[in-house]
Amino acid sequence: MNPKELFYKKSGIKVCENLKKHFFDAYYVDTKEDALKKSLELISKQDSVSWGGTITMEQIGLKQALIDNNYIIIDRDTAKSPEERVELMHKALSCGTYIMSANAITSDGQLFNIDGNGNRVAALCYGPKNILVIAGMNKVVKTVEDAYNRARNFAAPANKQRFENIQTPCETTGQCANCVREDSICNQFVLTRLSHPKNRIKVILVGEDLGL
């Protein structure tokens, strides 16, 4: 391992220990390939699976693996109309496993997320039987304040570049302007201090830079 990989491993194992103290089910893995293997171990084939917007899931190959292995999938991107897309997003809130990443994870074991529509954080808070959070070690920060700053000033403006139909100030400047607009993607800020029930939220920390 190179120095960065060793740093990620040592730090990631400690973060997972702290997540477990906060009642999360947490795992550290070294690579994307390990993350894919662990994810499939944690997702029951007996239950339906859905997800929020997550680049990390695509990067580790999980979406394609779920399709290839015939999991029961609720995929909003298969909708034939905006109305059907909304219907699938609502249906996802009662799935067996909901997959997402996190905008930030504090070193003491808390999750921080920012959301536009709120469907992703809604699922995190209540609904699906299990939540699977997959995040690269680049998402780990020291404090809740650092988590807020990462989500607001990096993750949100970076994610905005994925949505061509949203014309917020950060789309042009790449910087948060604390805008008040109907098309803002910074509408919900959720700090998940503890997993309730215990182990409902499962976290896989990956020793690579993944997502935004």
Image (cartoon, grey):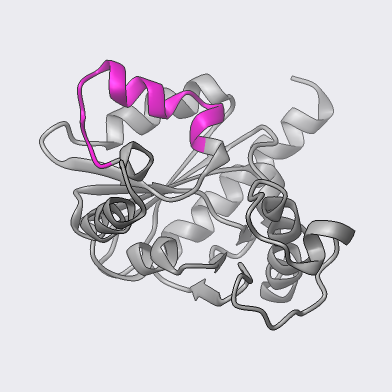
Residue sticking out furthest to the bottom: 180
Eyeballing the image, is 64 above or below 113?
A: above
Observer-nearest of 17 and 121: 121
Q: Residue at x 48, y 35 (%)?
A: 57
* Residue at image point 51% right, 30% down: 58
Q: Quadrant of residue 109?
A: bottom right
Residue 210 is situated, as x and y percent measured from the top left of the image, at: 65, 37
Q: Residue furthest top?
A: 68
Q: How many marks?
A: 0
Answer above or below: position of 34 versus 142: above
Which part of the image, by quadrant, shows the N terminus?
top right
Q: In the image, what residue occupies the spot 69% across and 72% down?
A: 148
In magenta stretch: residue 198? no
Drawn side of residue 198 relative to residue 23, left or right: left
- Above or below residue 43? Residue 85 is below
Q: Position of residue 11 (x, y in %)?
A: 68, 46
Magenta range: 57-74
Rendered location of residue 32, percent (x, y)? 55, 25
Q: Residue 59 lies in magenta, yes or no? A: yes
Outermost residue to the front: 81
User: Splitting the image into 4 quarters, where does residue 23 fall?
Assistant: bottom left
- Please give left or right for residue 52 compared with residue 9 in the image: left
Of residues 26 and 111, the one nearer the viewer is 111
Residue 64 at what x, y percent from top left? 39, 22
Kindly give the residue lying farthest to the left in the view shown. Answer: 46
